[in-house]
Image (cartoon, coloured by chain):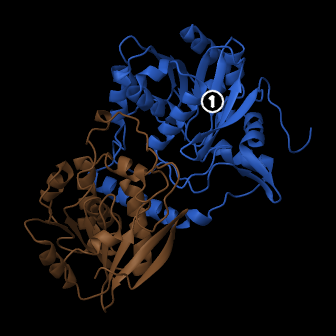
């Protein structure tokens, strides 16, 4: 599953996103979201089983997607990357590793009718920054690798973006309220930062479950 | 007078213009006053642009200051960027400051610019010697009478609308119109500012193209919305400011204002700082009453 069958270019504002098809098949697609500083190539090697088509997205500033000038990243912008991919794919189950897990979780709340289950897996960028914005005060410099993927600004900004637990809980409520699924979110990660701890306590979030078991449940929907 | 030009009493175009490269985003920088005078930075708010200081800036410059201001990315004559964020705006600001002086200088900032500068100063206190915050102080008031489930629904609508906007942003263009049309549109957001001023702003904040005038503001930008940011973070930043501080607050709510009240702000004024409440004035305090505000600012700077 590590080589793309095809790569589609999608436009998100001034960014061209690369969406790679990794596996053909009938039925609902599985969309894979990589971790911070990774790309679709990395997430493609995740050992999993899914009967339908599998796609993997390169986030803005990562892989074969556009590296923008001057940063300005947020997890919400990456959520909009995924929304562009979902507009192309239609209903999908979304699995994200690390930062991709947080983004999968956000889009499950933002587009509950399109996301048929979001699976959160351990990986780079799962924790995010401080939950208290004033704790982080350094104004960083990106260095000489600017313009190359993974974009240094993505690594800087998306490793310190604030993820307050109550903000995460709101997205859980959004997913539960309108997805029509009993458990629209599956937490399979071992690492448990405050935003994960907060959502684990909410109804509609599966815990103590493996990645493959969660995928099997969502595949049966 | 040509139909394409306007003047306004006291408005003066900047004495100098330059561009600063901020991580490959071009930032338009404007100055009034002698280059040898001490520097003061003016910072505009969201949806605004540097030339909104065309009256206030010269009043400060004429008192012996080198006034430096800039268009935030996506605003005025600065480049459109692929992405926008507060952190990016702060880095752009730091690039302008660094291009101007190595020493701490006073900062006078309006609305969103005030909140941006509080974050910058908290991070780099050595960059600023004093701060005047013009109605850019935090308000903790957030839909207080709306039940939780309705707030969740409103947030769902807001997120959906924001995502829909992202799909269309790449091809978005601003609606053209006559100079008078654009001023009338802006009057809906700036209801307390005179139509003469707003028509003047069109001539410095919009482009005249074959099919009419268009505001320069990047059409892909969308203000308001949602995110993890909480007003109390800004309050904590304000309380932590280690430099002399003057806050200015009007008492009349406006569409572009923050709705902050003295009672919201006073508990967070930094040690030794002070808050001036100007009665019967709206969000654009320095534009409504430039003489009074410039006097307050100059007294504070001196």
State the residue lying farthest toward the left.
A208
Place residue A207 in its image quadrant.
Answer: bottom left
Q: Which residue is drawn at 39% across and 33% down?
A: B139
Place residue B294 in its image quadrant.
Answer: top right
* Quarter placement of the N terminus of chain A: bottom left
* B204 vs B209: above or below: above
* B185 vs B296: above or below: below
Place residue B302 in its image quadrant.
Answer: top right
Reading the image, the residue beneath label 1 is: B69
Colour applied to chain A: brown
Judging from the image, what is the letter of the chain drawn in blue?
B
- Front position in the image: B195 or B81: B81
Element type where label 1 sits in the image: strand
- Left or right of B224 in this view: B22: right
- Left or right of B28 in this view: A205: left
Local crowd size for mark 1, using a 10 Å CA cut-off: few (<14), some (14–19), many (≥20): many
- Left or right of B249 in this view: B206: right
- Front position in the image: B94 or B56: B94
**Residue B14: x and y, percent?**
74, 28
Q: Is residue B193 visible?
A: no
* B235 vs A171: above or below: above
**Residue B71: x and y, percent?**
62, 38
């Amino acid at each position: 599953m590590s080589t793309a069958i095809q790569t589609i270019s999608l436009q998100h504002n001034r960014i061209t996103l690369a969406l790679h098809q990794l596996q053909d098949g009938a039925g609902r697609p599985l969309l894979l979201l990589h971790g911070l500083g990774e790309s679709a190539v990395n997430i493609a090697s995740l050992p999993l089983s899914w009967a339908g088509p599998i796609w993997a997205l390169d986030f803005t500033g990562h892989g074969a997607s556009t590296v923008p000038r001057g940063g300005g990243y947020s997890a919400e912008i990456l959520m909009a990357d995924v929304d562009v991919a979902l507009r192309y794919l239609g209903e999908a189950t979304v699995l994200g590793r690390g930062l991709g897990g947080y983004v999968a979780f956000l889009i499950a709340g933002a587009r509950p009718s399109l996301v048929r289950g979001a699976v959160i897996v351990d990986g780079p960028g799962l924790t995010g920054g401080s939950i208290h914005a004033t704790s982080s005060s350094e104004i960083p410099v990106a260095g000489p690798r600017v313009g190359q993927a993974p974009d240094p600004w993505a690594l800087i900004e998306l490793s310190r973006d604030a993820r307050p637990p109550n903000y995460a809980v709101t997205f859980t409520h959004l997913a539960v309220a309108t997805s029509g699924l009993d458990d629209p979110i599956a937490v399979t990660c071992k690492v448990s930062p405050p935003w994960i701890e907060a959502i684990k306590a909410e109804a509609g979030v599966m815990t103590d479950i493996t990645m493959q078991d969660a995928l099997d449940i969502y595949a049966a929907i | 007078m040509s139909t394409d030009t306007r003047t306004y009493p006291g408005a003066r175009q900047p004495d100098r213009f330059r561009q600063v490269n901020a991580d490959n985003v071009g930032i338009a920088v404007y100055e009034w006053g002698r280059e040898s005078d001490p520097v003061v930075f003016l910072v505009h708010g969201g949806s605004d642009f540097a030339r909104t200081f065309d009256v206030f800036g010269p009043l400060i410059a004429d008192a012996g200051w080198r006034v430096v201001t800039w268009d935030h990315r996506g605003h005025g004559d600065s480049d459109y960027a692929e992405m926008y964020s507060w952190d990016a705006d702060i880095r752009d600001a730091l690039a302008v400051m660094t291009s101007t002086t190595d020493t701490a200088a006073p900062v006078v900032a309006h609305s969103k610019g005030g909140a941006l500068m509080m974050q910058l100063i908290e991070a780099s206190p050595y960059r600023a010697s004093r701060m005047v915050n013009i109605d850019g102080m935090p308000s903790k008031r957030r839909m207080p009478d709306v039940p939780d489930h309705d707030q969740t629904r409103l947030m769902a609508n807001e997120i959906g609308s924001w995502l829909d906007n992202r799909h269309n942003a790449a091809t978005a263009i601003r609606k053209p119109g006559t100079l008078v049309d654009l001023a009338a549109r802006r009057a809906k957001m700036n209801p307390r500012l005179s139509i003469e001023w707003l028509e003047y702003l069109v001539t410095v904040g919009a482009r005249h193209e074959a099919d009419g005038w268009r505001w320069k503001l990047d059409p892909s930008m969308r203000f308001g919305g949602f995110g993890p940011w909480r007003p109390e973070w800004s309050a904590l930043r304000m309380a932590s400011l280690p430099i002399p501080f003057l806050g200015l607050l009007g008492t009349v709510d406006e569409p572009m204002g923050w709705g902050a009240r003295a009672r919201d702000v006073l508990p967070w004024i930094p040690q030794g700082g002070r808050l001036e409440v100007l009665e019967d004035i709206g969000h654009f305090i320095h534009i409504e009453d430039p003489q009074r505000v410039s006097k307050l600012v100059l007294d504070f700077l001196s």
